[in-house]
Image (cartoon, grey):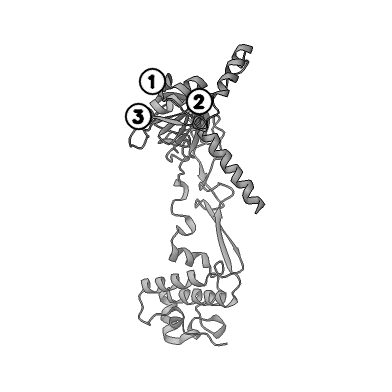
C-alpha cells in the first residue's frame, strides 16, 4: 500500500516552517491519540501516520532527502538511508516531548532537581466564643525538618551524593515496549538524580528528620466550622533545598450548650412558664457578651421567635453583624399539688369560649373537614 505524501498528511505546504509543522502535528496527535479513541482503529492509523510524517519532516536532513527522492529517500526498505518509519530506533517519546513540552531524556534538572515539601493539616477545635471573638492559640505539630547534620543532602559530612548510574542524573527512566515509550520516575534514586552512597548518621540518607514544633495561630473573629487558616512555609521541609510546604489549620467549632449558629445569626431556645406566656412579662435572655431583657407579650405561643438585633456574629469575610433569635418554649407544669390541680381544673372550665383557644379551635375545624371529605 502506497504512503500518502507527508505534507498532505500534516496538512501543510511544502515550504511550511518548523513551527507550522509542530503546530499541525500537535493538533493531529491530540485529535487521533489512541487514548482518546480507544475503539477506533482508523484513529490509531492516522495517529501513526502523522507521527511518521512529523519525524521525517522535522529532521532537516531527512526532509531534504524526502523532498528530493520522496519516500524512497527516507525508507530503508526501499533502499534509502533515512531509517524512517518506525524502525531505526525511532522513539516516539522524544518527538512527543519536543512537541508537547518536557525536559527530554535528562529532565532538564538532573541531580539539581528539588522538591517542595508536603503540605500539612492540623484540626483545631475551638469554642463558639473563641470563634466569634477571635483568639490566639499555640499548637504543636509533628513535621519533617531539614537535617542539621547534612543540611538536607542525606550524605555523611565530608561526602557528597553521586550521580545515579541508572538514569544518568535525569531522575527518570524510559521504558519502551513496541510502539509506545513511557517515561517514569527512576526507581533507584526516586527521581532525585543522585544516590547517597554514605548516608548521614542522623537522618540515614533521608535529608530530613522528624521533629515537633510549636506555632502560634491567630484565629480571626467570625470563623466557623470548615474554615481554613494557611500558614505559609510551615509544612514539611523540601527535598534538596526545595521550599517548605504550607500548614493548613482546619477550624472546628465545638457545640455550645445554649447557642447554635447559622451563618452570622445565633439561635437559642428560652423556656417560659405558662403564666408568663398568658399574661406577658420580662425575662433575662443570654447573649455571648452578657444578658439582655426580653419582653414577652401576653398570649405568646410556643415556637414564637423574638429577634435581638446585633447580638449575632460578624462574618470573618466581612458584612454586617447578625442577630440573636430567641425561640420561646412554654413549659408545662409538673409534679402538681392537689390544690394546684384544683385551680387548673377551675381555670380550665373558664376557657370554654373559643375566643381563648384560637389555635385549638382552628385545628379542630381542619380535622372535622378532613374526615368529612373522606366520606364523600
Marks 1 and 3 sit apart, C-alpha to C-alpha, by 12 Å
* Residue in the foreground of this view, choosing between 273 and 291: 273
- The answer to which of marks 1 and 2 sits earlier in the sequence is 2
Q: Is residue 37 left or right of residue 11?
A: right
Q: Position of residue 187 (x, y in %)?
A: 59, 49
* Residue in the foreground of this view, choosing between 68 and 191: 191
Q: Is residue 70 left or right of residue 365?
A: left
For the N terminus, the image quarter is: bottom right
User: Residue at horizontal 52%, vertical 23%?
Assistant: 257
Crowding near the residue tagged with mark 3, few <14, some 14–19, many ≥20 C-alpha atoms within 10 Å:
some
Q: Is residue 86 above or below residue 316?
A: below
Marks 2 and 3 sit apart, C-alpha to C-alpha, by 19 Å
Q: Taking the image as drawn, is residue 13 in sight?
A: yes
Helix, strand, or loop for circle 2?
loop
Q: Position of residue 147 (x, y in %)?
A: 49, 31
Q: Nearer the viewer, mark 1 or mark 3?
A: 1
Residue assigned mark 3: 310
Q: Is residue 115 above or below residue 262?
A: below
* Residue in the foreground of this view, choosing between 10 and 295: 295
Q: Taking the image as drawn, is residue 273 in sight?
A: no
Residue assigned mark 1: 292
Helix, strand, or loop for circle 3?
loop
Residue assigned mark 2: 256
Q: Position of residue 190 (x, y in %)?
A: 55, 47
Q: Mark 1 and 3 residues: CB-CB less than 8 Å, in contact?
A: no
- The answer to which of marks 1 and 3 sits earlier in the sequence is 1
Q: Nearer the viewer, mark 2 or mark 3?
A: 3
Crowding near the residue tagged with mark 1, few <14, some 14–19, many ≥20 C-alpha atoms within 10 Å:
few
Q: Nearer the viewer, mark 1 or mark 2?
A: 1
Of the numbered discs in the image, which one, if any, rests on residue 366?
Answer: none
Crowding near the residue tagged with mark 2, few <14, some 14–19, many ≥20 C-alpha atoms within 10 Å:
few
Amino acid at each position: 500500500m502506497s504512503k500518502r505524501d507527508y505534507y498532505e498528511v500534516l496538512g501543510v505546504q511544502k515550504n511550511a516552517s518548523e513551527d507550522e509543522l509542530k503546530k499541525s502535528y500537535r493538533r493531529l496527535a491530540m485529535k487521533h491519540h489512541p487514548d482518546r479513541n480507544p475503539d477506533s482503529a482508523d484513529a490509531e492509523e492516522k495517529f501513526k501516520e502523522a507521527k511518521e510524517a512529523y519525524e521525517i519532516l522535522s529532521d532537516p536532513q531527512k526532509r531534504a532527502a524526502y523532498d528530493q527522492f520522496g519516500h524512497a529517500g527516507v525508507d530503508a526498505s526501499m533502499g534509502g538511508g533515512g531509517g524512517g518509519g518506525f524502525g531505526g530506533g525511532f522513539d516516539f517519546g522524544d518527538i512527543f516531548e519536543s512537541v508537547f513540552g518536557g525536559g527530554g531524556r535528562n529532565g532538564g534538572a538532573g541531580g539539581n532537581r528539588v522538591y517542595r515539601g508536603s503540605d500539612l493539616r492540623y484540626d483545631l477545635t475551638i469554642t463558639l466564643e473563641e470563634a466569634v471573638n477571635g483568639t490566639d492559640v499555640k499548637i504543636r505539630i509533628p513535621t519533617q525538618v531539614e537535617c542539621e547534620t547534612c543540611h538536607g543532602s542525606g550524605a555523611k559530612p565530608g561526602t557528597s551524593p553521586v550521580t545515579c548510574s541508572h538514569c544518568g542524573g535525569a531522575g527518570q527512566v524510559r521504558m519502551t515496549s513496541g510502539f509506545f515509550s513511557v517515561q517514569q520516575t527512576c526507581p533507584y534514586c526516586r527521581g532525585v538524580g543522585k544516590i547517597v552512597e554514605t548516608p548521614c548518621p542522623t537522618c540515614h540518607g533521608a535529608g530530613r528528620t522528624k521533629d515537633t514544633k510549636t506555632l502560634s495561630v491567630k484565629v480571626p473573629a467570625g470563623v466557623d466550622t470548615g474554615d481554613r487558616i494557611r500558614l505559609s512555609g510551615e509544612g514539611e521541609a523540601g527535598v534538596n533545598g526545595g521550599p517548605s510546604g504550607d500548614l493548613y489549620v482546619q477550624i472546628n467549632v465545638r457545640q455550645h450548650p445554649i447557642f447554635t449558629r447559622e451563618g452570622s445569626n445565633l439561635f437559642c431556645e428560652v423556656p417560659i412558664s405558662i403564666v408568663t406566656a398568658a399574661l406577658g412579662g420580662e425575662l433575662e435572655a443570654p447573649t455571648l457578651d452578657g444578658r439582655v431583657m426580653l419582653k414577652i407579650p401576653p398570649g405568646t405561643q410556643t415556637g414564637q421567635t423574638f429577634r435581638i438585633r446585633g447580638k449575632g456574629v460578624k462574618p470573618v469575610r466581612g458584612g454586617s453583624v447578625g442577630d440573636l433569635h430567641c425561640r420561646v418554649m412554654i413549659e408545662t407544669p409538673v409534679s402538681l399539688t392537689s390544690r394546684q390541680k384544683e385551680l387548673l381544673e377551675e381555670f380550665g372550665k373558664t376557657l370554654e369560649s373559643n375566643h381563648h383557644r384560637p389555635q385549638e379551635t382552628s385545628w379542630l375545624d381542619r380535622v372535622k373537614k378532613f374526615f368529612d371529605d373522606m366520606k364523600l
